[in-house]
Amino acid sequence: MKKNNMFVGAAILVVAIAAVVVIVLTQGGGSSSGGDKTATVKPTYKVVAACKAFTLKDAEAVLGAGAAAGTTNGSSDTSSDDVAVSTCSYSSGSSQDVQTTKTVTVLARSAKSSAGAASNKAVFGKDKPVGKQDVPGVGDAAFWDSEMSQLDILQGNNWYIIGNMTGTHSNSGTLETSRAVFEQVKSKL
């Protein structure tokens, strides 16, 4: 009789556990299946190190052989609870004439929280600078700032700025050059 009681007790325990699992799954502890219940999806954030996304090889594809990394790459990278900011730049050749040197810079402003993501997205919405040229087909949203020769791109929760110039003239870059850099790096952003 003891074996029967143990068997019955074990069977009751298995049924009780199964009942608890069913209740948890249907009461919101697992994925919901219909009704007015919705699954909560926590947003993911991707912190991008600019020099890992924009490499010397990428710079050479745009600037040509002989491109050189900027001496301050990574030295001014910063981070807070909401965003991480990273920059990387390359210049063409070892020209002695600063006025003919071409420079390309990628700045990544990566969201680390919903506040950081909202701040990045606002620049492409309510806080977008006046008079900037929209650039369709680049990221989720993009605009060109001709005064600064910068292509501003929103991709996911992150804001990227791809600037380029010749010499020391901030307005000497082209949208085509910034677009070419974006094409080189977009799979790594």
Image (cartoon, rainbow, N blue to C red):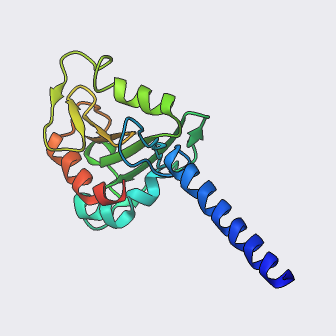
Percent position of residue 38, x then y: 41, 39
Residue under the image location 29 percent in, 64 percent down: 60
Whether residue 39 is situated above or below residue 49 in the rendered picture:
above
Q: Residue furthest right?
A: 2
Q: Is residue 154 depicted above or below 3 in this figure?
A: above
Labels in figure, total: 0
Q: Nearer the viewer, residue 17 or 116?
A: 17
Where in the figure is residue 67, as x and y percent of width and height?
34, 61
Quarter containing the N terminus: bottom right
Residue located at (49% from left, 44% from top): 86
Q: Residue at x 60, y 62 (%)?
A: 18
Report the side of 20 relative to 10 (left or right): left
- Quarter of the view holding residue 188: bottom left
Position in image of residue 26 (x %, y %): 49, 48
Q: Nearer the viewer, residue 16 or 59?
A: 16
Instruction: Pick whichever, 132 or 136, lies toward us.
Output: 136
> In the depicted view, which residue is nearer to us: 142 or 87?
142
Return the x and y of residue 16 as percentages of the image width and height: 67, 60
Examine the rendering and report whether any part of residue 70 can be seen. no
Which residue is rendered at x = 78% and y = 81% of the image? 4
**Residue 75, placed above or below residue 143:** below
Q: Does residue 156 show up?
A: yes
